[in-house]
Amino acid sequence: AARAALAESGAVMLRGLGVRTPGDIADVAAALGIAAMTEREGFAPRTAHAPGVYSGSHWPADEPMCMHHELSYAATVPGTLLLGCLTAPGSGGRTTVADSQRVLAALPPGLVAPFERHGWLLRRMYHDVGVAWADAFGTTDRSAVDAYCAAAGIEHAWLSDDRLATRQRRTAVVRHPRTGAPGWFNQVAFLNGLTMDPAVRDYLTDVYGPDGLPFDTSAGDGTPVTAATVDGINAVYDRFTVGEPWQEGDVLLVDNIRTAHAREPYEGRRDIAVVLGDPTELPGHVLPVSDGEHP
């Protein structure tokens, strides 16, 4: 019944299951037939609680986490997310959701067109700010990272001071593997440098140079993303955002391909356990980096 409700609505809250531990979350995932996957390329640190069960992303409590689809930039993406509330915050902290199919239909065609034509480009710099490359790729072996990047269509370069620069190009609009319906599936706005606090962005640029931000995005042909584009995307997300305050023991299921999610600021302790499930390779999602750029 839960899987059927998820297929119908794109997200469903299960209340009254009484989950209390990461092990309980793993049991719920197994009972629902959700195959857990190992996270790679995470944009924020997590704690691994148990095989396939993670904490929520470690992100400042007073800062929102904008709408996004988990690992939308990866070659293999989670088809399903399972989030379980072990400790509810004192206030705030909802995990909100938005239907990407409705978002796509509401976005201005002129905004969508270049991303639909060229995809989107994610540039990352792994250094001493943000997620270390060894944590993101789950290894300290550079040759293993080389192999991962080659298989995932990621251009990468090893730099001095143990830094790693990567670029990957992905489709921004995808068709749902079950229904074929198109949706706005990317992290163009959230991972753009303009989303960062301006003081932090300026500091990182001063210290690491213009290409030194932990992450930044552009259209797939290299055209910069403007503040108007970021604001326009987020404004449409806001129109379709819904959410329910967490209660301890709640479980939230999210169709990660159809439905974006976000996290509100909060006060108090908040402990959400997460399963990234149902690994999915979307046809045509991985695009060659060099083919998309201006000559």
Image (cartoon, rainbow, N blue to C red):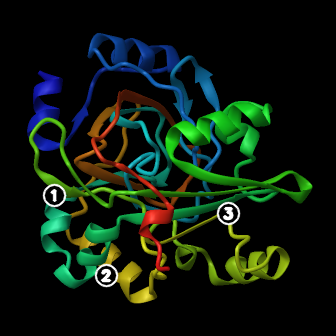
Image marks 1 and 2: residues in contact by CB distance under 8 Å: no
* Residue 87 vertical position relative to residue 264 in the rendered view, above or below: above
Q: Is mark 3 on a helix, strand or loop?
A: loop
Secondary structure beneath label 1: helix
Work out how far the residue at label 1 is from the one at label 2, CA to CA, in angstroms: 16 Å
Query: How far separated are the C-alphas under marks 3 and 2?
Result: 23 Å
Residue type at mark 3: give it.
Pro
The three-letter amino acid code for the residue at tag 2 is: Gly
Residue 263 in which image quadrant: bottom left
Q: Name above or below for residue 231 compared with residue 217.
A: below
In the orientation shown, which residue stands out farthest toward the right?
A: 161
Q: In the rendering, at what x and y percent does residue 84 appear?
A: 41, 31
What residue is shown at x 52% (from left), y 24% (from top)? Answer: 53
Q: Residues within 10 Å of mark 3 (few under 14, many from 20)?
A: many
Residue found at x 24% / y 76%: 113
Identify which residue is drawn at 39% across, 11% down.
Answer: 27
Q: Which of marks 3 and 2 is in front?
A: 3
Where residue 161 sits, quadrant-wise, is: bottom right
| Mark 1 or mark 3: whose residue is earlier in sequence | 1
Q: Position of residue 78 (x, y in %)?
A: 38, 35
Using the image, tell me which numbered label, if any, was put on residue 101: 1
Task: Identify the residue under disc 3.
Answer: 214
- Marks 1 and 3 sit apart, C-alpha to C-alpha, by 29 Å
Closer to the camera, 275 or 112?
112
The amino acid pointed to by label 1 is Gln
Using the rendered image of the protein, determine whether residue 121 is visible from the camera's viewpoint: no
Label located before the other in sequence (3 or 2): 3
User: In the rendered image, which residue does mark 2 sit on?
Assistant: 232
Image location (x, y in percent) of residue 201: 68, 78
Relative to 7, residue 28 above or below: above
